[in-house]
Image: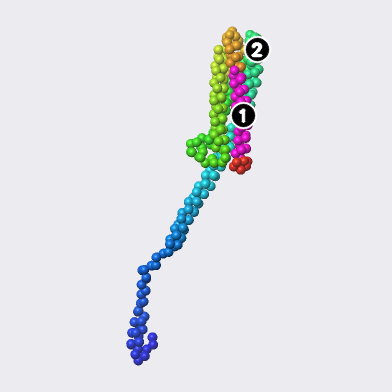
Amino acid sequence: MTTNSDGKEVTARNQEVANMEVHHHPDIHHKPKKWKEYFLEFLMIFLAVTLGFIAENLREHITERAKEKQHIEGFIRNVKDDTALLHHVIVIDERQVRGVDSMLALAHVNMDIDSNRKSFYHFVYYYFFNSSSFKSNDATLQQLKSTGDYRLIERDHVADSLTKYDRDIHDIYSEGAYYESYFKENLSRLEDIIDVTIFTDTSFIKNGKLSNKPFPKLRSDNEKLPTFFNKVFDFRMITNAYAENYLKLQLESSKRLIAFLKEKYDIEE
């Protein structure tokens, strides 16, 4: 601090200056905004909301398309299971048709002859105690129905193809039920003709092979045989139609559907 003769007066004056505060009061009278400023503010808000909406829709679209492809991939796996089973059932049913054809050759032979009876029992044992029908792996289709995700299938002709596949499968079920009912009917008719208990007797059949032991005579005196063979012929026609007109056609259709879906969704093995 510098002092002079008037030191006290200078010091007091300096202190007064140092303690002085200058207060600036804001101008509370704003100028009104121009309409362009309001428009720009509105435009920015609108763009922000719109972009947010677009981004959310895009995210949802990407999620749904990914989910759609997952469903199709699952469906393809199911159809592959179906094609494997279709092939298996076709092989068994064709084998059954051939066996029944051989059995029908006995329709007019003398069943009092042991060799004829043995052949009859042979065909009954190998072809009348096993049936084979098709059951689809419909896990993905059921999921699409139960969750409402069918709406996600957007690509051209895909939803229609899935619906057709489902309808074709149910047509096969109807024919398969007819085949199974006829199979059971023929099996029940056997009880009036032969003694089915011999199939558990190892002196007649052992390890799947028929022995040389004379087989029991038929229970009926051939009165019911003509009717039985007529039913066997019907069963042969039904089994052949089931395999040829339903299973084989579905097998080829399933292969084409798999190829179509792989191409549509760019799916590789």
What is the x, y in percent for residue 217?
A: 60, 10
Q: Which mark is residue 136?
A: none
Q: Which residue is drawn at 55% across and 36% down?
A: 160
Q: Residue at x 62, y 35 (%)?
A: 256
* 239 magenta-colored: yes
- Given this view, does label 1 or label 2 mark the residue nearer the observer? 1
Inter-mark Cα distance, 1 to 2: 37 Å
Q: Label 1 belongs to which residue?
A: 249
Is 151 placed above or below 59 here?
A: above
Q: Which residue is drawn at 55% across and 22% down?
A: 178
Contact, mark 1 vs mark 2 (Cβ under 8 Å) = no
* 48 magenta-colored: no
Category of crowding for the residue at label 1, using alpha-carbon neighbours closer than 10 angstroms: few (below 14), some (14–19), many (at least 20): few
Q: Which quadrant does the N terminus fall into?
A: bottom left
Q: Which of 50 and 219 is in front in this view?
A: 50
Q: Nearer the viewer, residue 262 or 107?
A: 262
Please give the count of numbered marks on the rendered protein.
2
Q: Residue at x 65, y 10 (%)?
A: 109
What is the x, y in percent for residue 108?
A: 64, 11
Q: Which quadrant does the C terminus fall into?
A: top right
Q: Residue 116 carries which label?
A: 2
- Is residue 42 at all visible to an observer of this figure? yes
The amino acid on which the numbered mark 1 sits, given as a three-letter code, is Leu
First of labels 1, 2 by sequence position: 2
Is 98 placed above or below 41 here?
A: above
The amino acid on which the numbered mark 2 sits, given as a three-letter code, is Asn
Q: Is mark 1 on a helix, strand or loop?
A: helix
Q: Which of 54 and 261 is in front in this view?
A: 54
Please name the predominant secondary structure of the magenta segment in the image. helix
The magenta stretch spans which residues? 234-262
